[in-house]
Amino acid sequence: MDDYLDRAAATALKRAMSSTPVIILMGARQTGKSTLVRSEPFLADRPYFTLDDFSTRERATLSPEDFVRSAPSLIIDEVQRVPELLLAVKAAVDEERNRTTGRFILTGSANLLLMHQVSETLAGRASYVNLWPLTRRERLGLAQTGSWSELIAAPITEWYDLVGGQTSARADWRLEARLGGFPTPAVQLPSDDARQVWFDGYVRTYLERDLQDLAAIDNLIDFRRLMRAACHRLGGLVNQTDLSRDTSIPRPTVHRYLNLLETSYQVVRLQPYSVNRTKRLIKSPKLYWPDTGLALHLAGGVEPTGAHLENLVLSDLLAWRDSRIPRPEILYWRTVTHQEVDFVIEQGDQLLPIEVKSTPRPRARDARHLLTFRDEYEDRFLGGLLLHTGEDVFWMSDRILAAPWWKVF
């Protein structure tokens, strides 16, 4: 496709094809899964079927076994729409004495590992690849995520030159938050008005069709109200009691709705770094949205805040994490006395904490929790990063580097 932007996840997909018979590409609707599997040259010779097409879905439902055996290798798009196909794929794989790697490429707009109605996980037969919304560098045509791997690989003494030498043009983080990472509004639509119309249609499709593939929801108004409430709590701790009170939705229903949002890649619950040394740590996850443009739309047109800049960083980190082997962990750190670091990369026995500040001139107090984290985990501490909205790269303290966000991702 002429307008295809190369994706960092394509490398992970190609790598997985050499390891297992089945590769499942998962992510929210409209992140570009279909475009990726139809555009990458290494998939060009494969028959492609989408279960969004009614006649294709009907054929797959009536005879899953015949469907998966219709060609030596297949791409099946939106496989969660006919969960019975997974059993047929499993049978087709198991009947081969010498399993063909990369035989089936399946895509899904829901996390099949979290779907209750999908009992077959294809354990031992499948690799899973996540496709997140476009990163900033993908949108610029670089097919990259941020410089996280380079920072982890480099000695701390080289960080200043590594970050300072980046040639990225300065960007407006508020505009970046409004654009988000869905390819159509982020790249193709020319105005805020056009993007808002697109986001409105996206939400309607998600509520009225995609969500119904996962579970029967009787009250879509309540569900949308919860989505809006979640968007107003970006970067905050998940407190289902508070969400229940503020939305007048029963707490068990709030719990169920949040699970559905996570299953369909609409929210991210970021888990805490919980290796306890001397401090009592918060154990609740924090709530984010994979796409800041959609989050701002659902919140009712509010202006971007520091939480949205945090969310932009997390979106890039998630895309980076899921393109790596071995897969690092992305976590946050917070104590009961409210000392907090926004993100912690855990790679093997190394820790890289990241603090995000929506200020062009960070001060010493902005790094105080990074210093606490450094002292707490001295033996694993790789270096600390404070991302800000200014232009200067400088050392804030021993092994704590302040850097413009746009030079890092």
Image (tube, grey):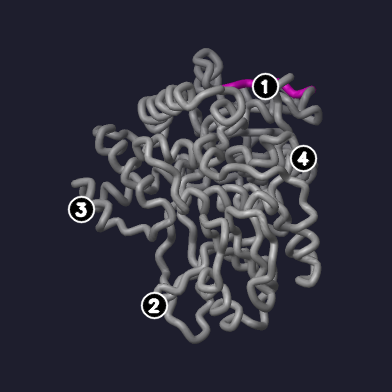
Q: CA distance from mark 1 to mark 3?
A: 46 Å
Read off the residue under disc 2: 337
Quadrant of res 351? bottom right
Read off the residue under disc 4: 14
Which one is earlier in the sequence, the residue at label 4 or at label 1?
A: 4
Q: CA distance from mark 4 to mark 1?
A: 17 Å
**Which secondary structure, mark 4?**
helix
Which one is earlier in the sequence, the residue at label 1 or at label 3?
A: 1
Q: Nearer the viewer, mark 2 or mark 3?
A: 2
Q: Position of residue 114 (x, y in %)?
A: 47, 47
Read off the residue under disc 3: 245
**Which secondary structure, mark 3?**
helix
From the viewer's side, name the closer residue of 132 and 177.
Answer: 177
Q: Magenta region: which residues?
A: 45-50
Q: How many marks?
A: 4
Q: Nearer the viewer, mark 4 or mark 3?
A: 3
From the viewer's side, name the closer residue of 59 and 239.
Answer: 239
**Which secondary structure, mark 1?**
strand
Q: Nearer the viewer, mark 1 or mark 3?
A: 3
Q: CA distance from mark 4 to mark 3?
A: 46 Å
Asked whether disc 1 touches disc 3, contact meaning CB atoms under 8 Å apart, the reply is: no
Asked whether disc 2 touches disc 3, contact meaning CB atoms under 8 Å apart, the reply is: no
Q: Kindly tell me whether residue 88 is visible in this rendering.
A: no
Disc 1 crowd rating (10 Å Cα; few below 14, some 14-19, many 20+) is some
Asked whether disc 2 touches disc 4, contact meaning CB atoms under 8 Å apart, the reply is: no
Q: CA distance from mark 1 to mark 2?
A: 54 Å
Q: Does 172 lie within the magenta span?
A: no
Q: Does 49 lie within the magenta span?
A: yes
